[in-house]
Image (cartoon, grey):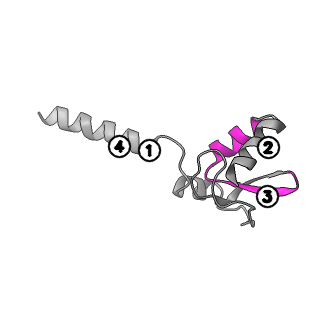
Amino acid sequence: MKATMTLAAACLACVCLVGCNSGSKTAQRDSGAAVVACSNHACPISGKPVNSKVTSTYGGKTVGFCCTMCKSKFDAMTDADKAAKIAAMK
């Protein structure tokens, strides 16, 4: 019973730590980055609030993301896909 509880707690901890997170992990990695005014308030990939330290430039505007994973996904997109994501945010 004790081993089962420990295993369940470990699995829950792993689930809580995995995935896209705009919280402290991104802030710690990017602590030296300047805060920039973004043209959006929600991440175009996840829809979560943006971290203004995680940005990319597209179409002459600064686009904010919730985390570096979402920024990487956006940066790897074609221009047509980027335009579609930006248009969907409006």
* Spatial separation of the CA atoms under disc 2 and disc 3: 13 Å
* Spatial separation of the CA atoms under disc 1 and disc 4: 6 Å
Residue 85 or residue 46, whichever sits in front: 85
Q: Decide if residue 1 is on the left or right side of residue 35.
A: left
Picture coordinates of residue 20, whole percent (x, y): 54, 44
Numbered label tally: 4
Local secondary structure at mark 4: helix
Type of amino acid under label 4: Ala
**Label 1 Cα crowd, 10 Å radius (few <14 / some 14-19 / many 20+):** few
Which residue is depicted at the point 81% across and 34% down? 78
Which mark lies nearer to you, 2 or 3? 2
Local secondary structure at mark 2: helix
Q: Decide if residue 35 is on the left or right side of residue 47.
A: right
* Spatial separation of the CA atoms under disc 3 and disc 1: 28 Å
**Mark 2 vs 3, N-terminal side:** 3
Picture coordinates of residue 68, whole percent (x, y): 65, 47
Picture coordinates of residue 73, whole percent (x, y): 69, 38
Question: What residue would you read off at disc 4?
Answer: 13
* Spatial separation of the CA atoms under disc 3 and disc 4: 35 Å
**Mark 2 vs 4, N-terminal side:** 4
Type of amino acid under label 3: Thr
Question: What residue would you read off at disc 3?
Answer: 62
**Mark 2 vs 1, N-terminal side:** 1
Question: What residue would you read off at disc 1?
Answer: 17
Which mark lies nearer to you, 2 or 1? 2
Question: What residue would you read off at disc 2?
Answer: 83
Type of amino acid under label 1: Leu
